[in-house]
Amino acid sequence: MPSPTKPDKKPENVASVLKVFSVLETLSEEGSAPLARIAQKAMTSKATTHRLLQTMRDLGYVEQQAQSEEYRLTLKLFSLSARALEGQDRLLKATESGMARLSQETGEAINLGVIDETGQDVVYIRQIESSYALSLKCTVGSRNRLYCTALGKALLAWRNAAEVDACLQKMSFAPVGPQTLADASAFRNDLAQTKAQGFAEEIEESEAGVRCMAVPVRDQAGQSVAAVSIAFPLFRYDAAHREDYIALLTQVGREASEALGYRSEPAQTGPAIIPKV
């Protein structure tokens, strides 16, 4: 007689993994939180959440504060993230001096982003904060949608058509900022313009009062592997220096790309030094 078929455990295992990451993401967003709050946001029962938290605590990823009894993440996850970033070491080194120069000459926030594993988001893997008291802050590891950011446009405009099509199929084009692009057609047109002019731009597409410009960082094959951006508060963006911003960004992108093996045409002119406001 044939042996009875064993029940498939995969759906149950997948559900457990999803619950674990839901709890981790909740703690990442909350900083610290009591059991009831974590269970509510992670959409799991208190009993399940408590069991997961105790396991994570035993493994060293979560700690419980003695007085408040709230849970929070430990630095063990940070060490994992740091090791993951070591895999981007060549990219970080290639962009280091250029990002520093952008920061010094503009005083604004400078970001380095890559496409995440889902093909829907840009992940910020490095930021140099603005020198101004009122500035735009973005933590390393945070994400934003590709379709509403200058980084996302710069990343996709230099990818092959099949990759762009695959990404577009996943995009919802849900409004994020006052000027978020409405659909795939508008986004394709923007990507074409981005590639033609050599840089990406967005004005209040991801956030009210914010304007960004970005350029791709390309590998030996000419494909974008990252993008570098300048993020301006609208009130501090100086239209008179637009061409200087573009020239400076373009040079930084070209130098970083060449450090990764890409060979481009020599620059026609060097960037101007941009006086800070």
Image (cartoon, grey):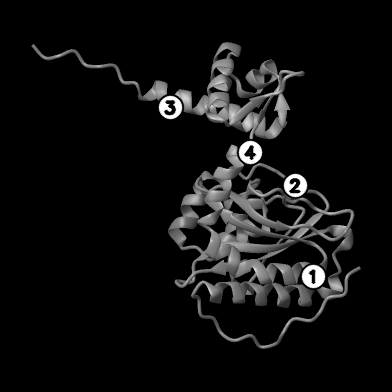
Return the disc, 1 or 2, that comes first in the chain's sequence: 1
Q: Is residue 255 above or below residue 173?
A: below
Q: Is residue 47 above or below residue 163?
A: above
Return the disc, 2 or 4, that comes first in the chain's sequence: 4
Front label number (3 vs 4): 4
Give the distance between the C-alpha atoms of the residues marked 3 and 1, in whole angstroms.
47 Å
Which mark, residue 177? 2
Q: Position of residue 149 (x, y in %)?
A: 67, 55
Describe the element under mark 1 as helix, strand or loop. helix
Which mark, residue 75? 4
Return the disc, 3 or 2, that comes first in the chain's sequence: 3
Badge 3 vs badge 1, beta-carbon distance below 8 Å: no
Which mark, residue 232? none
Q: Amino acid at mark 1?
A: Gln
Label 3 packing within 10 angstroms: few (<14), some (14-19), many (20+): few
Residue for badge 3: 14
Q: Position of residue 36 (x, y in %)?
A: 68, 15
